[in-house]
Image (cartoon, rainbow, N blue to C red):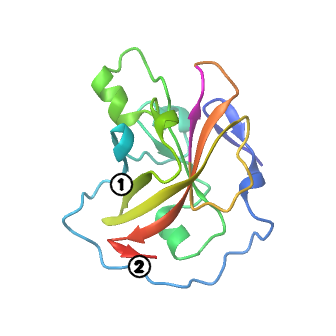
C-alpha cells in the first residue's frame, strides 16, 4: 500500500517489519491550557507556524498548509508507543500564486532545505508541546527506512520526483525531557 502525497508515492517501507503496536510505556502529561487548541507545526529556524491539516484528502489539505499523513502516527500515538509508525507531515514548498509571501513563509516548507541536524521542530498537539530535533537530512525519491519519530518532507523543485526529507526524534514534551 502506498500513500499519495505531493503527487509522488511515499513508500510504505518506512514501517518497521512488526506491524503490531508496542505496549504503551507512558501516559500523557496534563494538557497545557496556555497552548493553542489548534494542532500546530512550528519550525523556528525557518518561520513556519501553521495549523496542521488532517484528513484523507491530501490535495485539499495541502492547499491550506502542512498535512499530517492520516494513516501514519500522530504525536500522541507515537509518544504512547501505540504504533510503530512515524509521524509524517508534508507541505507544499512553492504553494500557489495566490499565496502572499508572508502566508507562504508561515505555512509552506519553502525554506525546509535551510534546516540542519540539531534544529528543533515543535508540534502543539491537543495542547501538549512536543519538541523534536532533526537527526538526519536527505534528498531522495522515497522515504528512507529509518527509526525516526517525525518525518517532514516537501518537493525539491516545482515538478520533480525528488523530495527533501527531515528526520527528527522527540526530545521533550511539555518541557520535560523524554
Q: Where is residue 121 in the image (x, y as percent from the top left)?
A: 42, 53
Range shown magenta? 152-157
Closer-to-camera residue (64/169): 169
Q: Earlier in the sequence, mark 1 or mark 2?
A: 2
- Residue 169 position by quadrant: bottom right
Tell me: 51 left or right of 68. left
Toward which corner of the image does residue 48 lie, by quadrant? Answer: top left
Helix, strand or loop for disc 2: loop
Q: Where is residue 99 in the image (x, y as percent from the top left)?
A: 35, 21
As drawn, which residue projects farthest toward the right?
A: 17
Toward which corner of the image does residue 73 lie, by quadrant?
bottom right
Task: Name the residue beneath numbered marker 1.
Answer: 39
Residue 58: assigned label = none
- Above or below residue 135? Residue 52 is above
* Residue on which disc 2 sits: 28
Residue plotted at (59% across, 29% down): 155
For residue 85: magenta? Answer: no
State how far apart marks 1 and 2 are (Cα): 16 Å
Numbered disc 1: secondary structure: loop
* Observer-nearest of 72 and 100: 100
Residue in the image at 33% along x and 71% along y:
174
In the displayed structure, would residue 105 be above or below residue 99?
below
Can you say whether 119 is above or below 61 in the image?
Answer: below
Residue 172 location, x and y as percent?
Answer: 41, 70
Left or right of 170 on screen, residue 102: left
Q: Position of residue 5 (x, y in %)?
A: 62, 37
Cβ atoms under marks 1 and 2 closer than 8 Å = no
Crowd tier of the residue under label 2, counting other residues whose Cα lies within 10 Å: few below 14, some 14–19, many 20 or above: few
Whether residue 17 sits left or right of residue 130 in the image: it is: right
Q: Residue at x 63, y 84 (%)?
A: 23
* Residue lying at 41% horizontally and 79% vertically, measured from the top left: 28
Amino acid at each position: 500500500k502506498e500513500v499519495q502525497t505531493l503527487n509522488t508515492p511515499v513508500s510504505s517501507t518506512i514501517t518497521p517489519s512488526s506491524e503490531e503496536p508496542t505496549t504503551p510505556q507512558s501516559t500523557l502529561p496534563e494538557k497545557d491550557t496556555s497552548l493553542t487548541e489548534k494542532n500546530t507545526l512550528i519550525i523556528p529556524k525557518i518561520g513556519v507556524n501553521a495549523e496542521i491539516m488532517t484528513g484523507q484528502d491530501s490535495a485539499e489539505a495541502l492547499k491550506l498548509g502542512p498535512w499530517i499523513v492520516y494513516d501514519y502516527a500522530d504525536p500522541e500515538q507515537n509518544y504512547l508507543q501505540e504504533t510503530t509508525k512515524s509521524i509524517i507531515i508534508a507541505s507544499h514548498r512553492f504553494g500557489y500564486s495566490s499565496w502572499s509571501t508572508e502566508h507562504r513563509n508561515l505555512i509552506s516548507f519553502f525554506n525546509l532545505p535551510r534546516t540542519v541536524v540539531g534544529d528543533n521542530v515543535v508540534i502543539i498537539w491537543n495542547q501538549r508541546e512536543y519538541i523534536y530535533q532533526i537527526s538526519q537530512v536527505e534528498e531522495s525519491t522515497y522515504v528512507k527506512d529509518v527509526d525516526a519519530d517525525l518525518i517532514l518532507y516537501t518537493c525539491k523543485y516545482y515538478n520533480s520526483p525528488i523530495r527533501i526529507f527531515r528526520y527528527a526524534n522527540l526530545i521533550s514534551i511539555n518541557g520535560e525531557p523524554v
